Image: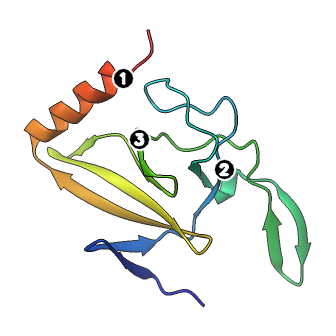
């Protein structure tokens, strides 16, 4: 049984049992509209995946073709960054990490100045 926390490059990631992953497919795009390379991973919600079979109380799902959650960038083929968000005037983004078939997430708090720089970079990378 996997633990609920993972240390990676000095950050603590929490396992997200409601999320799963799949390889990017043709037509998958970043939030700004740019294509995601097919050798990268994308994060999908398990509740959106169809159940292909159920055996002894275990549901087997198929994430292929399911719409992924919005992503802003990839840091590695197995690590993606969500878009910059603001909650109660606190700017942050979420890093998603795929390790041993599980999805882990880490929320990174950032200053408003960094948030504006990241948003400007995301909109500058948008295809015209």
Q: How is the image coloured?
A: rainbow
Residue that label 1 marks: 125
Instruction: Tell me what residue is drawn at x 50 percent, y 68 percent.
Output: 16
Instruction: Tell me what residue is drawn at x 62 percent, y 33 percent.
Output: 28
On screen, residue 122 above or below 16:
above
Q: Looking at the image, tell me whether mark 1 or mark 3 is earlier in sequence order.
A: 3
Image quarter hosting the N terminus: bottom right
On screen, residue 46 above or below 123:
below
Q: Position of residue 79 (x, y in %)?
A: 45, 56
On screen, residue 43 above or below 99:
above
Q: Which numbered disc covers residue 73? A: 3
Q: Looking at the image, tell me whether mark 3 or mark 2 is earlier in sequence order.
A: 2
C-alpha separation, residue under disc 2 versus residue under disc 1: 22 Å
C-alpha separation, residue under disc 3 versus residue under disc 2: 15 Å
Residue that label 2 marks: 23
Q: Residues within 10 Å of mark 3 (few under 14, many from 20)?
A: some
Q: Residues within 10 Å of mark 1 (few under 14, many from 20)?
A: few
Which residue is more in the foreground, 128 or 91? Answer: 128
Asked if the residue at tag 3 contacts the one at tag 1, i.e. Cβ–Cβ closer than 8 Å, the answer is: no
Q: Position of residue 84 (x, y in %)?
A: 29, 40
Q: Using residue 51 as the reference point, say whether residue 21 is left or right of it.
A: left
Q: Position of residue 74 (x, y in %)?
A: 43, 46
Asked if the residue at tag 2 contacts the one at tag 3, i.e. Cβ–Cβ closer than 8 Å, the answer is: no
Q: Residues within 10 Å of mark 2 (few under 14, many from 20)?
A: some
């Amino acid at each position: 049984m996997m633990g609920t926390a993972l240390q990676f490059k000095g950050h603590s990631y929490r396992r997200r049992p409601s999320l799963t992953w799949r390889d990017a497919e043709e037509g998958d795009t970043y939030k700004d509209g740019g294509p995601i390379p097919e050798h990268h991973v994308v994060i999908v919600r398990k509740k959106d995946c169809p159940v292909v079979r159920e055996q002894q109380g275990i549901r087997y799902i198929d994430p292929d073709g399911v719409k992924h959650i919005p992503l802003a960038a990839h840091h590695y083929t197995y690590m993606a960054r969500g878009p910059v968000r603001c909650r109660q005037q606190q700017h942050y983004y979420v890093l998603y990490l795929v390790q041993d078939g599980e999805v882990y997430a880490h929320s990174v708090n950032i200053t408003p100045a960094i948030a504006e720089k990241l948003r400007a970079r995301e909109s500058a990378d948008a295809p015209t």
